Amino acid sequence: MPFCVASIGPSYKWNGLVVFALIALGLLLAGGAIVYNRRRHRPTLLTLTNENALLTDELARCEEQIDNRATNLINVVNVLLRDLANDLGIYRGDTRLSVYRHNEDKFYLVGRVSPNENYAAVGRTSYPDSQGFIGQVWRAADDKTNVTFPTDRQDWVETQVQSYGLSRSEAEVLKMHTVFMTATKLRRDVHDAAFGVLCIECDRKRGSVKAGTLNEVRNSPQFKTLTSILDISLTGLSHDEVKRGFLDKASNSGSLPTQQS
């Protein structure tokens, strides 16, 4: 009976190649599936660009809404200030009314009116509460209200430097040479903490503003309305937002704030 010896060498090698090929094919298919899946779920550059553009537009719309709110608030404050001045007979070319909000250690301008365009112009939109007469009004427990200044310009500048904390360069560029000033803290009611200051300035001693003007202001319905609106509206606005409102208002009127106040 013949005896056969089976060789497994070639068959083993062939089977090994098949197994290797199958494994390689499986890995290739798996890798392809992973790559396809990632590409299918990964945003394209165009998609990311479009999403970024949408977010940028949304941010611009939000900023515009904030700017509009600030500008509208300034307009409302100025209307109330003008009505207040007209009601008291002090809306004249020698006088201006300004409203400041106090926050931390600074005053921020939020409204200003005068029929004199130079006096109504916005200079600094903020300054330290250690400067000026309204800084003294803010810190005074007895609510000091009136002050007179020299009519001579050089004496006036010296007074601002020596008594009211301004530098000489700051005092020299101030646009309005105020001779009489009266001011009061702003509170929603007498028991609340103050949040700002109303300031009335006149460029002459015997002008439209008198020592008793402030009492008339406090008893005016317009003043009470102004105080209530400011107390509510200023809560959600930062200084930068109010400043942008002033810039927007100035650009619409064709004039921009200067470094003078």
Image (cartoon, grey):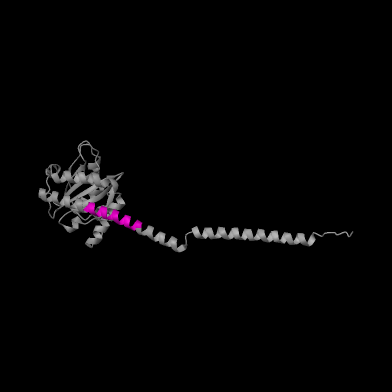
Q: Quadrant of the C terminus?
A: bottom left
**In-image side of 107 versus 58 (left or right):** left
Q: Is residue 67 magenta?
A: yes
Please provide the residue range marked out in magenta: 58-74
Q: Residue pushed farthest right?
A: 1
Q: Mark yes or no: residue 147 visible.
A: no
The quarter of the picture where residue 256 lies is bottom left
90, 249: nearer the viewer: 249
Query: Where on the picture, by quarter, is residue 32?
Result: bottom right
* Residue 231 percent location from the top left of the image: 23, 44
Horizontal side of 54 relative to 94 (left or right) equals right
Residue 102 visible in the snapshot: yes
Residue at 25 percent of width and 43 percent of height: 195
Left or right relative to 29: residue 69: left
Vertically, is 92 above or below 182?
Answer: below
Residue 75 image point, x, y percent? 21, 54
Q: Position of residue 236 (x, y in %)?
A: 29, 47
State whether residue 30 is above or below residue 100: below
Q: Is residue 66 above or below residue 50?
A: above
Q: Nearer the viewer, residue 125 or 61?
A: 61
- Give the quarter of the figure containing the N terminus: bottom right
The residue that appears at 79% across and 60% down in the rendered structure is 9
Examine the structure image and report whether residue 31 is included in the region drawn in magenta: no
How many callouts does the rendering have?
A: 0
Q: Main secondary structure of the magenta part?
A: helix
Counting from the top left corner in percent of width and height, residue 77 is at 20, 50
Q: Nearer the viewer, residue 75 or 82?
A: 75
Which residue reaches farthest front? 1
Q: Is residue 94 left or right of residue 134?
A: left
Q: Residue at x 21, y 51 (%)?
A: 111
